[in-house]
Amino acid sequence: MANVTVIGAQWGDEGKGKIVDWLASRADAVVRFQGGHNAGHTLVIDGKTFKLSLLPSGIVSGTLSVIGNGVVLDPWALKAEVEKLEGQGVTITDDNLAIADNCPLILPIHRDLDGLRETAAGSGKIGTTGRGIGPAYEDKVGRRAIRVCDLAHLDALEPQLDRLCAHHDALRAGFDQDPVDREQLLAELREIAPFVLKYAQPVWKRLKKVRKAGAKILFEGAQGVLLDIDHGTYPFVTSSNTVSGTAAAGSGLGPNSTGFVLGIVKAYTTRVGSGPFPTELDDEIGKGIGERGHEFGTVTGRQRRVGWFDAVLVRQTCAISGVTGIALTKIDVLDGLDEVKICTGYRLRGQVYDYFPSHSADQAAVEPIYETMEGWKESTASARSYADLPANAVKYIQRVQELIETPVALVSTSPERDDTILMRDPFMD
């Protein structure tokens, strides 16, 4: 049995939640390895909707769920999410939830700084969720983060607070804000510490034991490759590496443990917030796709921008993340269109490109080159086998995998877990 790593191969919001839930029901452990509670997953199980931001998707089915050291953890958001799920009947204990004790914390001062920066940026806004993700990663790299393990040693925290506040007080002064209230911060940490610490442990050791027992591990990525801090549409990106290789560093297991890499890909393209989007549709077709696809952010509620499928971008993200196969989601949203388009290349200043250039000005200036295919009037919704799909939908799927040079392993035809067409089982690879 292979382990499986799931990543988004576009700008996030590709429908990872449903696919991860489907896989989690067959896994022995699910691991989040990067990001924070800016990630949103919506699961629909037997008609019941669960919205997750921080907890791994396996928690709903009772599968061992692990928050790895590559995640930045807001302890108050964690508590709120646990309580919300428990209110929906989900059982969460230290048997099925483990949090890396070396995981950096998102503090109220990180949320403050995130909001102050975005407000001051004007036209240069990145479009963050305002949840403190970026500033928390900055403090991690700057070696001044407070981590989960520090919650057990709050009486010895003064030297770390000195480093942290020296940095943040200077930044806050620049925004005409008062210095960090250290006593209030300590009081808030003392209050939340017992809740977090009951789940804290060296998860690398727990996962080593799971792997040694021959169990199946599912690594769950957040956001998408086009939001990767190195490989995404910089600076309109997140603050972590979202590529599959991060699963190793962000969990404490080696790179030989990540297994089959499944890239989640929407049958069209969406993104939330600012940044380049070559195939964006500002017409009635785009509006219709967005309405049928319920394209609103799970975390922010912001309306997503919608466009045609961009094979250039997905081919690039599949190569960068070493994708073994893709899961194509929301094919049913394209039902009823007279024609569908796929971007196969770009024009930029008279030249044709078969990749997305790195510079933001070039990214904003590229013009998509489209291939047009005949649409399908028949419904693909809830199809559970390839034979149930209309002929033109099958042609579309086949053309997508040709253009992105990566096979389709799964096709999702509705938000329901069982409405999934399996062509290649990632766990059996």
Image (tube, rainbow, N blue to C red):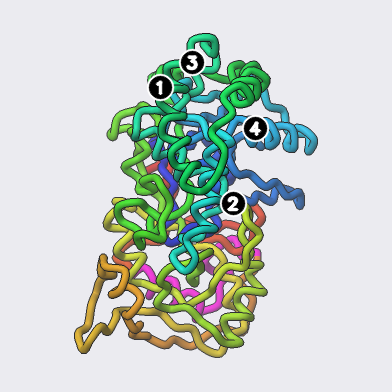
Badge 2 is on which residue? 18
Q: CA distance from mark 2 to mark 1?
A: 26 Å
- Lower position in the chain sequence, tag 2 or tag 1: 2
Q: CA distance from mark 2 to mark 4?
A: 26 Å
- Lower position in the chain sequence, tag 3 or tag 1: 3
Badge 4 is on which residue? 76
Verify CB contact (< 8 Å) between mark 2 and mark 4: no
Residue at image point 49% right, 43% down: 133
Badge 3 is on which residue? 157
Verify CB contact (< 8 Å) between mark 2 and mark 1: no
| Mark nearer the viewer, 2 or 1 | 1
Q: Amino acid at mark 3?
A: Leu
Residue at image point 36% right, 68% down: 401
**Residue 395 within the segment the image draws in magenta:** yes
Verify CB contact (< 8 Å) between mark 3 and mark 4: no
Write the start and end of the magenta stretch as one range: 382-402
Q: Amino acid at mark 2?
A: Lys
Which quadrant: the N terminus? Answer: top left
Mark 1, residues whose alpha carbon is within 10 Å: few (<14), some, or many (≥20)? some
Q: CA distance from mark 3 to mark 1?
A: 25 Å
